[in-house]
Image: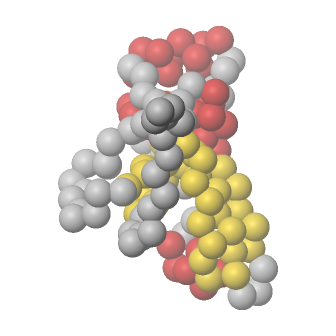
Amino acid sequence: MPQMRISEAAVYLGVSDDTVRRWVDRGQLTADRDDSGRKVVDGYEVAMVAREHATPPGLPDGMKSSARNRFVGLVTDLTVDTVMAQVELQCGPFRVVSLLSSEAVRDLGLERGSVAVATIKSTNVVLETPGRDDA
């Protein structure tokens, strides 16, 4: 499973580094040490906590795009067969599901706990509003 530093987990969870450390101390997240001796947490565990404590994160550092409909999140589930795949992301409070080729999943190196950005480009957007009483 992918691992991430405490500060990275904090970004995706929408909380401070200290909060993530407290969650580790309380056993809400499991921490290990990477090869450099830094504390890291499992990306999939972070994704599961993100579902419970969801706040939309911004784009990762250095990323720019003209797309306006972008959802940064963590992979929470994958269903992959020989041709197609279904990838589920937890993007703050939003669940985003994408259907793509199995080859694309392999090329992107997606697995549970991976960071991904869902970019939505659509000319068909449905807007809904509460009903109005026009007399």
- Relative horizontal placement of residue 67, taking residue 9 as reference (left or right): left
Residue at 39%, 34% in the rendered image? 11
- The number of discs equals 0
Q: Please provide percent x and percent y for residue 85.
A: 69, 75
Q: Measured along the vertical axis of the image, is residue 6 above or below residue 61?
A: above
Q: Please provide percent x and percent y for residue 53.
A: 57, 25
Q: Quadrant of residue 104?
A: bottom right
Q: Nearer the viewer, residue 7 or 74?
A: 74
Residue at 45%, 62% in the rendered image? 125
Residue 9 visible somewhere in the drawing: no
Q: Please provide percent x and percent y for residue 33.
A: 54, 35
Residue at 68%, 68% in the rendered image? 86
Q: Quadrant of residue 122?
A: bottom left
Residue at 31%, 48% in the rendered image? 59
Q: Nearer the viewer, residue 67 or 14?
A: 67
Q: Quadrant of residue 10?
A: top left
- Relative horizontal placement of residue 78, taking residue 35 as reference (left or right): right
Farthest residue, direction bottom: 83
Farthest residue, direction front: 135
Residue 96 visible somewhere in the drawing: yes
Q: Please provide percent x and percent y for residue 64.
A: 21, 59
- Relative horizontal placement of residue 76, taking residue 40 as reference (left or right): right
Q: Measured along the vertical axis of the image, is residue 23 above or below residue 49?
A: above
* Type of colouring: secondary structure
